[in-house]
Image (spheres, rainbow, N blue to C red):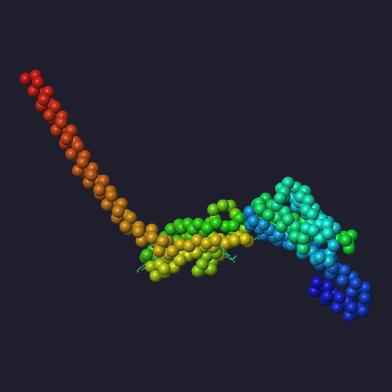
Amino acid sequence: MPCCVQKFIVKTMAHHHLWILLFCLQTCLEAAGSDTDIFIVNGILGESATFPLNIQPSQKVTIISWHSKTSVAFVKPGNFGEEPIVTITHQNYHERISVSGQNYNLELRNLRIEDSGIYKADINVETSKVTTTRSYNLQVYRRLEKPKITQSFVTSVNSTCNVTLMCSVDKEEKNVTYSWSPRGEEGNVLQIFQTPDNQEETYTCTAWNPVSNNSDSISAQQLCADITMTPHTRHTGLMSGLAVLSVLIVILPSVVLFLLCKKGEGRRFSHKVPS
Ligand SMILES: *[C@@H]1O[C@H](CO)[C@@H](O)[C@H](O)[C@H]1NC(C)=O
Ligand SMILES: *[C@@H]1O[C@H](CO)[C@@H](O)[C@H](O)[C@H]1NC(C)=O
Ligand SMILES: *[C@@H]1O[C@H](CO)[C@@H](O)[C@H](O)[C@H]1NC(C)=O
Ligand SMILES: *[C@@H]1O[C@H](CO)[C@@H](O)[C@H](O)[C@H]1NC(C)=O
C-alpha cells in the first residue's frame, strides 16, 4: 500500500494525470485482495484451529468454496439470517467443521497431524463477479512433552568435570528448538565445566515448538556426582573383590578339608572291614 501511495504522489506531481490515480487505486485494491499471501495457522493436535476470513456483514456472500489436498466444504449464507449452511465435501472433515455466522471464519476441530497443509477459500460475493481466494498454511503440532536431559562425561581434571548435556524430546517432532537457562544458549547441546564452586547451579533445558514449550532441569550436584564418586566406587570395588577373595580363601580350603576328612574316614572304615 505505501508503495502505491508513493507512486501516486510522484506521478501526479509529475504529470497531474488523474488516470494514474485511478490505475494506482486499482493496483492497491488488488494488492489488498492479497490473493498471493499465505496466512500461517498453527494448530495443536486434538484441538481446533480457525481460518480467519473476517468477512464484513456488508459483504453479501453468495458462496465460499474450501479446498485443500481434497475438497473440504461449501459454505452458503443461511436463510433469514440463520447460521451459514455448511456442506462437507470430503469424509475427512465429517463433523469437524463449523462456520461463524458473523464473519464466515471456519473452525476445524479435533485436529490431526495429516490435516497440515495449504487450505484455500474461494469467496464469491453478490457485488463482484471476481472470485477472491484466500490461502492458509495449517500446521498441526503436538503439545511438547517434558524433554530429557542426558549427560556424557568427557573429562575430569583437578575436580573440574567437563560435561556435555544433550536435550531431546521423545517423539520425532517437527520444528523443535531448544534453549538453556541460565546460560541463554540455543541448541540441544550444552558444554559445562563444573567446578566445586558452582555446585548450586541448575541447568534448565526448554524445548519449543510453534505451539508449546516444556522444560526439564538438572542440578550441578547431580551432574558431577559420578565424578566425585569415582574414587569411592573404585574403593568399594576393591573391597568387594577382597571380600570374594577372602571367602574363597576361607571356604574353599574348609570344603577341601571336609572332603578329605570324609574320604579318610571312609578309607579307615573300608580298611577295617577285611581285618
Ligand atoms: C591442576 O592443578 C595443578 C596444581 O594445582 C596445576 O599445576 C595444573 O595445571 C592443573 N591442571 C589443569 C588442567 O588445570
Ligand atoms: C571438553 O569436552 C569437549 C567435548 O569432548 C572437548 O571438545 C573439550 O576440548 C574438552 N575441554 C577440556 C578443557 O577438556
Ligand atoms: C519448520 O521446519 C521446516 C523444515 O524442517 C521449515 O521449512 C519451516 O519453515 C519451519 N517452520 C517454522 C514455523 O519454523
Ligand atoms: C510456555 O508454556 C507455558 C505453559 O506450559 C505457557 O504458559 C507459556 O506462555 C509458554 N511460553 C511461550 C513463550 O510460549
Q: Residue at x 30, y 53 (%)?
A: 236
Q: Quadrant of ligand 4?
A: bottom right
Q: Quadrant of the N terminus?
A: bottom right
Residue 111 against residue 180 in the figure, above or below: above
Q: Quadrant of the C terminus?
A: top left
Q: Residue at x 79, y 64 (%)?
A: 55
Q: Residue at x 70, y 52 (%)?
A: 96
Residue 165 drawn at (x, y percent): 48, 60
Answer yes or no: is residue 123 visible.
no
Relative horizontal placement of residue 263, taking residue 204 as reference (left or right): left
Residue 9 drawn at (x, y percent): 86, 78
Q: Residue at x 39, y 70 (%)?
A: 197
Residue 118 drawn at (x, y percent): 73, 55
Answer yes or no: is residue 268 visible.
yes
Residue 131 against residue 271 in the figure, above or below: below
Query: Which image quadrant for residue 135?
Result: bottom right
